[in-house]
Image (cartoon, rainbow, N blue to C red):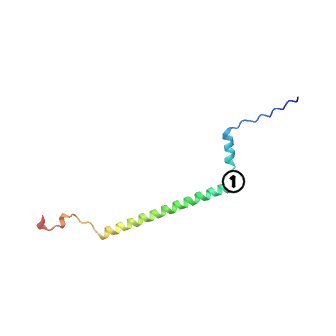
Amino acid sequence: MKTRRKKTARPNRGKQAIAGRRARGSSAANLKAQLDQRTRERDEARAQNERLVEEAQARKRELSEAQENYPRRKSSRSQLPRSCE
């Protein structure tokens, strides 16, 4: 009866080596798609921020215009006739 040859021993690489190998397999197209998506998200966030700043500036202008049109009175007591005091 013939004896079987033993298989050559392979180094035990573990799960980390396998996971690392998969991560390196990212294609250029996949990386480009990720970059495009993140660029779109950045541009949308910038546009939203600009809209919020414009709204805040418009509100500030409206408030200052309203304050110019309606000056504050010194006190309500000074407006009463002398007979009521």
Q: Nearer the viewer, residue 51 or 64?
A: 51
Question: What x and y, as percent, mark residue 51?
Answer: 47, 64
Q: Is residue 79 above or below residue 32?
A: below
**Outermost residue toward the top?**
1
Residue drawn 68% across the image and 38% down it:
14
Counting labels gives 1
Q: Is residue 10 above or below residue 60?
A: above
**Residue 5 x %, y %:** 84, 32
Looking at the image, which residue is at 81% across and 32% down?
A: 6
The quadrant holding residue 40 is bottom right
Local packing at callout 1 (Cα closer than 10 Å; few below 14, some 14-19, many 20+) is few
Q: Residue furthest bottom?
A: 69
Q: Position of residue 7 (x, y in %)?
A: 80, 34
Examine the image and state in which quarter residue 42 appears: bottom right
- Circle 1: element type: loop
Indicate left or right for 69 with 37 as reference: left
Quarter occupied by the N terminus? top right
Q: Position of residue 49 (x, y in %)?
A: 48, 61
Question: In what quadrant of the picture does the C terminus appear?
Answer: bottom left
Residue depicted at 71% across the width and 36% down the height: 12
Q: Residue at x 86, y 29 (%)?
A: 3
- The three-letter amino acid code for the residue at tag 1 is Ser
Question: Which residue of the protein is positioned furthest toward the front in this rendering?
Answer: 1
Would you name the residue on which mark 1 appears? Answer: 27
Q: Nearer the viewer, residue 45 or 14?
A: 14
Horizontal side of residue 61 vs 31, given as left or right: left
Residue furthest to the right: 1
Q: Is residue 82 left or right of residue 30?
A: left
